[in-house]
Amino acid sequence: MSRRVLITGVTGQDGGYLAEQLLAGGDEVIGTVRAPTAQTFAAAGLPQLEGRVALLPADLLVPETVRAAIAATQPDEIYHLAAPTFVPDSWEDPTEVVAAVAGGTAAVLAAAGALARDVRVLVAASSEVFGDAGVSPQSETAPMRPRSPYGVAKLAAHGLVGALRARHDRFLVSAITFNHESPRRPERFLPRKVTAGVAAIAAGRAETLTLGDQAAVRDWSHARDVVAGMVLALRHDEPGDYVFASGVPHTVGDLVDAAFAAAGVESRAPDGGDRVLVDPRFVRPPEQWPPVGDPAKARELLGWQPRTSFEQLVGEMVAADLERACASR
Ligand SMILES: C[C@H]1O[C@H](OP(=O)(O)OP(=O)(O)OC[C@H]2O[C@@H](n3cnc4c(=O)[nH]c(N)nc43)[C@H](O)[C@@H]2O)[C@@H](O)[C@@H](O)C1=O
């Protein structure tokens, strides 16, 4: 059965993978971006989606534009992925991040609920909702005590899904996604910063890589695997909340080591000097309860599990960055 699907934030990392997967399955895909004339698929490095996914404008800070896009599309399903995503930015402008993430989710859910047809909606939450959970790994029922404005805003979005689902018996899903990466990830996020930096060293274009805390722990998956889980969740018999994570903790240092190994480069310079430097500007406060997910519910109810290992993920990212580094020589 072919569905009409609306993806907010379709030119982002997850939106691109999701659109590709849905198109391959025969669905009709429509996407929203803030400014379709500037945010084209070509500009986003996704030329393969050009002409296959119609783009509509929708600004999360202007609910009327969100309503208009949803009303014009009359979708069977909505994947609400659009949001600011870089956590440190949320300290600079909490007002905007709360408005865009919590207000934007409220606008999407209200507009979908106002349609005359049943529409299933998935909202992308985040492991940042857990913060000082007091437990790690975290499942869907772990305490949620976010430590960043971004996490607070995502918790509001997650809470809206649960409240509206309970009150109106709607098919709403919250996807509590842990860190997920790919060669399409922007370079300000740690994994792409590392793989692009290591590729630059391998290509002889840089000598060092400057990071923050190498002891920080994350649970990294491939974005392609995570969006596959989102589709399973939205097409399941019952709506619910799902953690999407590998369940495997790694430190930043592990990721750095894996990237150097994948590039075939020593992590020490020939003179014995360290190739990884620390800049306190990139160091965040320590986390007592690292964001590591317990994906048992998704595995048991949806049959989901990540297909890509940590080493394969880093290997794929390093290979893509080495190719880019060679192409730009
Ligand atoms: C689930 C969650 O996942 C992402 O948020 P994030 O975890 O903040 O992602 P990141 O790649 O910026 O940091 C990962 C870790 O790496 C440490 N780290 C060390 N040195 C550097 C460094 O130099 N740069 C960065 N960015 N991080 C560094 C940093 O302290 C942190 O412990 C977003 O998708 C977000 O939208 C989301 O929802």
Image (cartoon, rainbow, N blue to C red):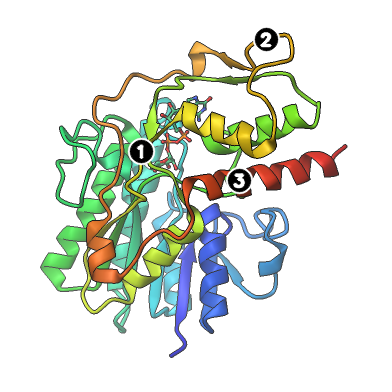
- Which disc, if any, is residue 315? 3
Q: What crowding class fits label 2: few (fewer than 14 Cα within 10 Å), some (14-19), or many (20 or more)?
A: few
In the rendering, at what x and y percent does residue 26 appear? 54, 84
Does residue 321 appear in this view?
yes
Who's the residue at 45% across and 20% down the image? 213
Residue 160, image x and y in percent?
Answer: 22, 55
Residue 258 is marked as none
Q: Quadrant of the C terminus?
A: top right
Q: Is ligand 1 closer than 8 angstroms to the Cβ of mark 2? A: no
- Which residue in the structure is indicated by mark 2? 272
Q: Which residue is mark 1?
A: 249
Report, in whole angstroms, how far the alpha carbon at label 1 lies from the one at label 2.
29 Å
Name the quarter where the N terminus is drawn.
bottom left
- Residue 189 visible in rendering: no
Q: Which mark is first along the chain, 2 or 1?
A: 1
Going by the numbered disc 3, the residue's amino acid type is Gly
Element under disc 1: loop
- Observer-side mark, 1 or 2, equals 2
Helix, strand or loop under label 2: loop
Is 168 in front, or is 265? 265
